[in-house]
Image (cartoon, rainbow, N blue to C red):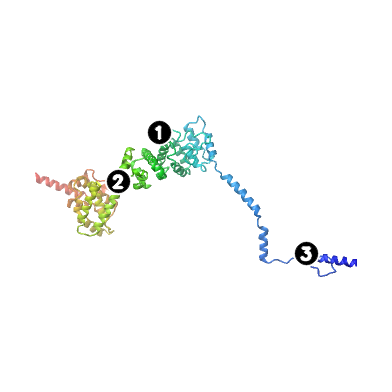
């Protein structure tokens, strides 16, 4: 009985082990386990198994990412204080300003100006790192002894420091964009620096603009309510314009103002609310020695009025009324009186408006017919505003410019002058002065003087005959 129990126990254990081991035993008498080779997995299962085997460990992957991230952070970490200290270390106590300039030019690669460009400009202009709010960071570092803020408030000394900065910019072109960004940033604190430092910053800004290293548009940063209200914006702009005119002509300034649209109402925005009147603007710029700016503003406003009057004249002319000539004359005289125009200014507006109101044909014959129609339709209008030699000469000069700038008029200059004379718009004296005594403009002078030569000779002959008759 004991043997039977033992054999049964062994058999039961074998069967149990065979089940857990994935072993099949069909012969009860055979106690040796026979392993069964697994069959091939379906294609989808194989791919899934491969992906599971090759899938990276999430924990390991995250650790690698963090290590790379820390490495990048170390590479791009900015340390403006270290940059400033490195520059200061190069400036010895007995360093001259010329040696300082040479140091700035030769240290770009070693100190990485490209990364620390704004810190560089704060260092050379303000003398240190500018903190939020406009103060200079006070961490025990000495200020730059050759910065713009460190020099006396004179044009010559500020110019010298600006020249040193420009030398560096010309050598390393990538710095120019950062100069604009830094100046725009500093202008926000125009009322936080000392008055002397703010004035030196404005002078430096004027020189940068004059040298074409900075656009005038940067002063738009000053159009913040608190800066305008306390007069900081206007004072800064005034100094910038005064400095610009030290090296550049007035025409360059007016062109620059128009280019950045710093005109009309935009210019008034620099003035506090209670000073935004024509008289206040004129008084301010006159007192600052900027009369050219006053004249420019006046001209701009005059051009706006003239453009409006021109549109009104075009409407009257295009209406086709028989009274158009009279109506335009009344309108022109009223505007002349209200705006303080001279006859010369008024006749210029009339001539340019009449020419601009016609859709001129590109065919020569049709063009000539149109021209004769205009000249014979409005003689009394032009005559009303040509009662002085100056007005007559001005009209002839405007006609000359029309014929010079528009090729369709080129061959008709003599025709226009002749009809002006016949309709008593211009006198014989005005024509002769224009042709022979310096009245003609330089634009196309040779061509037009030669063109009217037969008419001038005829006028002289008429004058001689008149003198003979008088004798």
Q: Residues within 10 Å of mark 3 (few under 14, many from 20)?
A: few
Q: Residues within 10 Å of mark 1 (few under 14, many from 20)?
A: few
Identify the disc placed on residue 422.
none
Q: Quadrant of the N terminus?
A: bottom right
Q: How many marks?
A: 3
Mark positioned earlier in the residue sequence (3 or 1): 3
Disc number lying in front (3 or 2): 3
User: Does dot 2 land on a helix, a strand or a loop?
Assistant: helix
Identify the disc placed on residue 20.
3
Q: Is residue 471 left or right of residue 418?
A: left
Q: Residues within 10 Å of mark 2 (few under 14, many from 20)?
A: few
Q: Is residue 161 visible?
A: yes
Q: Quadrant of the C terminus?
A: top left
Q: Pointer 2: what residue?
A: 299
- State if disc 1 and disc 2 touch (CB < 8 Å): no
Q: Is residue 93 left or right of residue 50?
A: left
Q: In x, y percent, where is residue 222?
A: 41, 43
Q: Is residue 295 left or right of residue 20?
A: left
Q: In x, y percent, where is residue 182?
A: 46, 42
| Quarter of the image where one finds residue 34 | bottom right
Residue sitting at the far front: 274
Q: Pointer 1: what residue?
A: 154
User: Does dot 3 land on a helix, a strand or a loop?
Assistant: helix
Q: Is residue 319 left or right of residue 11?
A: left
Q: In x, y percent, where is residue 221?
A: 42, 45
Mark positioned earlier in the residue sequence (3 or 2): 3
User: Does dot 1 land on a helix, a strand or a loop?
Assistant: loop
Residue at the (39%, 42%) spot, across then down: 229
């Amino acid at each position: 009985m004991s043997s039977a129990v033992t054999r049964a126990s062994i058999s039961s254990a074998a069967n149990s082990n065979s089940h857990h081991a994935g072993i099949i035993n069909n012969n009860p008498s055979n106690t040796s386990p026979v392993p069964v080779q697994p069959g091939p997995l379906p294609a989808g299962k194989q791919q899934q198994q491969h992906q599971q085997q090759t899938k990276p460990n999430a924990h390991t992957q995250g650790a690698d990412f963090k290590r790379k991230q820390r490495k990048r952070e170390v590479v791009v970490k900015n340390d403006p204080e270290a940059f400033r200290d490195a520059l200061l270390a190069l400036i010895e106590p007995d360093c001259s300003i010329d040696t300082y300039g040479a140091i700035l030019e030769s240290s770009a690669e070693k100190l990485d100006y490209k990364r620390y460009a704004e810190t560089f400009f704060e260092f050379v202009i303000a003398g240190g790192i500018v903190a939020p709010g406009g103060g200079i960071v006070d961490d025990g570092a000495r200020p730059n002894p050759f910065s713009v803020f460190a020099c006396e408030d004179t044009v010559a000394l500020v110019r010298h420091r600006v020249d040193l900065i420009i030398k560096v910019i010309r050598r390393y072109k990538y710095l120019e964009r950062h100069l604009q960004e830094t100046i725009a940033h500093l202008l926000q604190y125009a009322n936080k620096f000392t008055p002397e430092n703010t004035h030196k910053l404005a002078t430096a800004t004027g020189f940068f603009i004059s040298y074409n290293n900075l656009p005038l548009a940067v002063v738009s940063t000053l159009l913040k309510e608190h800066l305008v209200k306390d007069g900081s914006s206007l004072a800064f702009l005034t100094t910038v314009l005064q400095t610009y005119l030290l090296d550049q002509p007035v025409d360059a300034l007016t062109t620059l103002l128009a280019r950045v649209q710093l005109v009309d109402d935009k210019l008034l925005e620099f003035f506090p609310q209670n000073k935004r009147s024509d008289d206040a603007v004129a008084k301010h710029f006159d007192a600052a020695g900027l009369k050219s700016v006053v004249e420019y503003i006046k001209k701009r406003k005059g051009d706006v009025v003239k453009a409006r009057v021109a549109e009104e004249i075009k409407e009257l002319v295009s209406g086709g009324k028989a009274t158009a000539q009279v109506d335009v004359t009344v309108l022109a005289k009223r505007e002349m009186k209200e705006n303080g125009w001279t006859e010369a200014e008024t006749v210029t507006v009339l001539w340019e408006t009449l020419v601009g109101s016609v859709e001129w044909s590109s065919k020569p014959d049709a063009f000539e017919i149109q021209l004769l129609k205009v000249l014979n339709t409005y003689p009394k209008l032009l005559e009303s505003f040509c009662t002085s030699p100056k007005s007559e000469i001005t009209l002839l000069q405007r006609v000359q410019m029309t014929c010079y700038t528009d090729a369709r008029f080129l061959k008709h200059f003599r025709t226009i002058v002749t009809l002006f004379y016949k309709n008593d718009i211009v006198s014989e004296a005005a024509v002769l002065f224009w042709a022979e005594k310096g009245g003609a403009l330089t634009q196309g002078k040779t061509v037009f003087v030669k063109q009217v030569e037969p008419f001038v000779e005829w006028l002289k002959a008429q004058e001689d005959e008149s003198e003979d008759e008088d004798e």
